[in-house]
Amino acid sequence: MTGWELHARLPHTLPAGEIRAINNPSGAIHEHRTYHWNGWDFDLPPGVFHPGETSRLVHSRLLDGTLPVAGLRYAAMGAGLGVEAVVAGVRGAGVVYALDVHPESVRTTARHYERIVGTDGPPLVPLVADVWEGFPDGEQVDVVTFNPPAIELPLSDDPEIVRNLCLGRDIAARFFGQLVARDLLAEGGVVYLILSNTAPLRDIVAMALESGFGAEVLHVEDWEGDNVQTYLFALRRESRTGEG
Amino acid sequence: MHEHYADAIADPDHIRLAPDLVCLRFEVMKVRSALGAVRHLLATGVVRPGDTLVDSSSGIYALALALACHRYGMRCHIVGSTTVDETLRIQLEILGATLERMPPSKDLMLDQNRRVERVGQLLLENPGYHWMRQYHDSIHYAGYREVAERLDRELPLEPLTIVGGVGTGASTGALAEYLRAMGRDVRLTGIQPFGSVTFGAQHTADPDMIIAGIGSSIEFRNVRRDLYDRIHWVSFRYAQAGAVALLRDSGIFAGLSSGAAYLACQWERHRAPGRTMVFLAPDTGHRYVSAAFADHADVPDPAELSPHEVSGSDDVLLPWSVADWATDMPAQRDASRLPVGVPGWSS
Ligand SMILES: C[S@@+](CC[C@H](N)C(=O)[O-])C[C@H]1O[C@@H](n2cnc3c(N)ncnc32)[C@H](O)[C@@H]1O
Ligand SMILES: Cc1ncc(COP(=O)(O)O)c(C=O)c1O
């Protein structure tokens, strides 16, 4: 099932109270933290996102090859601490672009990449960018992953928490708008987008469809103990693939 | 007594032109916005004195930011274009701001992208740099809080209609938002040039020059369309008529966006009895002398001009159109709305 037929089956956004109960951001974002995954150690300066289960749904699928990147031009949008970039490097992407609006996140990604992937791996292009604004013109990518901070509630006044979690549908609108307007996704390219029903999931998928993408669900996670559902989508330009 | 020149030129003069018509006349309005933003960043600890503030700009914001940096002991780094004029370039140099100039192309979106790419490089290499993002960061509203408070004190009673050109939307948006938050009855009328995407008139074009400071060919997230009740689209020629009339009628020598606001204000006045019209005059007339004032004898008399009243941006027509702005967009959900007032900083 793809396209609008799929859209009609997608879950509605959870009530605000439920979202607040699940996402209870703490002040820890202002501290120095560490993260350990797949035998790798990451260190997180203040402001850099600490991955959760949603992030790991993407990380583990990049690692096991479900989301192929070998030989492809790959972009980690909203790179954060850099796990996706590191995995794509290890999995032999052709080139890895790491984009984030938060300069410290981009520096952190570059540091982790250098330490874990090293100079023998594919080249890393670290970019401080506002979604795609700042991505070099005339270049294209084949694969993009994006775990957008798309919750649409002001969970906090803290700008660091807002940037990491709650920018709403606006960030997705700009992501698709610029990707299409500047033709940044190569022929046959794919965007892997992960969204939960804590965000306006349906509206964001509608935006992708309206921007000319076809949508396919690769995975649904129905977490135990709450009503959160997380969807991993593969989005491809319709006109290019001729997919229905 | 002002503590700094920037404060002096940032505060507007309130000039009553008629019982129901007030002009907020600025020397350089953008300085108010830049001062407020920098002060907010310092007060919230996002930046410290000595840090560098960076943004892309080729216009008046570059000077405004350089002055705000001078005022608060910050460094300033501007990524601009080779078209930056000499008056601006020399002032920036003497103020100690760094100006990088990149050649412009025909495509504004790509130019903006290249400048952001350069800003991104600077941010990556320099941990002490902070990106101002005047088009998108709502901290640029903060400085207008004092303007709203003073207006509230000077015009304590009557319902207000604020009229002003919309560039980034910070000045008009903030005035309306702060005054409404004080419980005031405020209507907001925005002025746009033809061709601007901001309120959906990108399918039109002005045959003459552009009106500096208002309108845009790219999306500015600081424009909050849901705040506006009415939009006027005004041609260069008609803005010129307004600017000449403003000087003739009141002695105020102001720029083209001021002229357009004055024109719209005069027309709206008679249609909104009981409201006081307050229009913004964001800059002086000096830079427009040859383009707008020199042929003053040939410009039409505003009393003879009237707009096409249209139902929305699809129908706008030269040389002047007005529409009620009933936004079909959901109220903007951007979580970072108005910067909250910083205790102890409001004058
Ligand atoms: C939910 S975190 C995801 C981090 C990482 N990809 C992961 O999954 O663990 C969202 C990231 O998006 C970044 N971000 C927020 N606004 C952005 C923008 N306008 N452009 C690029 N990145 C942005 C944040 O800085 C943050 O690193
Ligand atoms: C002459 C002039 N008019 C109007 C404006 C619009 O102000 P804002 O960016 O607050 O919408 C500006 C801003 O630079 C300006 O320079």
Image (cartoon, rainbow, N blue to C red):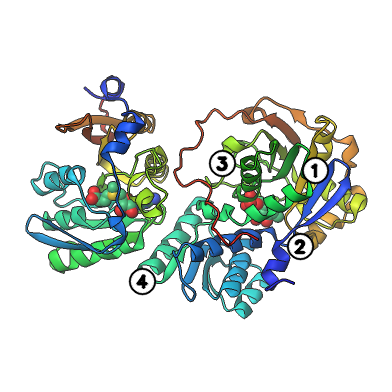
Percent from the top left, x then y, of residue B304?
90, 35
Which mark is first along the chain, 3 or 4? 4
Which mark is first along the chain, 3 or 1? 3
Camera-nearest residue between A48 and A215: A48
Spatial separation of the CA atoms under disc 1 and disc 4: 47 Å
Spatial separation of the CA atoms under disc 3 and disc 2: 29 Å
Spatial separation of the CA atoms under disc 1 and disc 2: 18 Å
Mark 3: few, some, or many residues within 10 Å (few <14, many ≥20)? Answer: some
Q: Are marks 4 and 3 in contact (CB under 8 Å)?
A: no
Mark 1: few, some, or many residues within 10 Å (few <14, many ≥20)? Answer: many
Percent from the top left, x then y, of residue B182?
64, 43
Q: Secondary structure at mark 4?
A: helix
Spatial separation of the CA atoms under disc 1 and disc 3: 26 Å
Residue mark closest to the camera, 1 vs 3: 3
Q: Secondary structure at mark 3?
A: loop
Chain hosting mark 2: B
Mark 4: few, some, or many residues within 10 Å (few <14, many ≥20)? Answer: few
The amino acid beneath tag 4 is: Glu
Q: Secondary structure at mark 2?
A: helix
Which mark is first along the chain, 2 or 1? 1
Image vertical order of residue B315 relative to residue A152, above or below? above
Q: Which residue is mark 1?
A: B238
The amino acid beneath tag 1 is: Tyr
Q: Residue at x 85, y 40 (%)?
A: B20
Chain hosting mark 1: B
Q: Secondary structure at mark 1?
A: helix
Place residue B277 in its image quadrant: top right
| Discs 1 and 4 lie in a common subunit | yes
The amino acid beneath tag 3 is: Arg
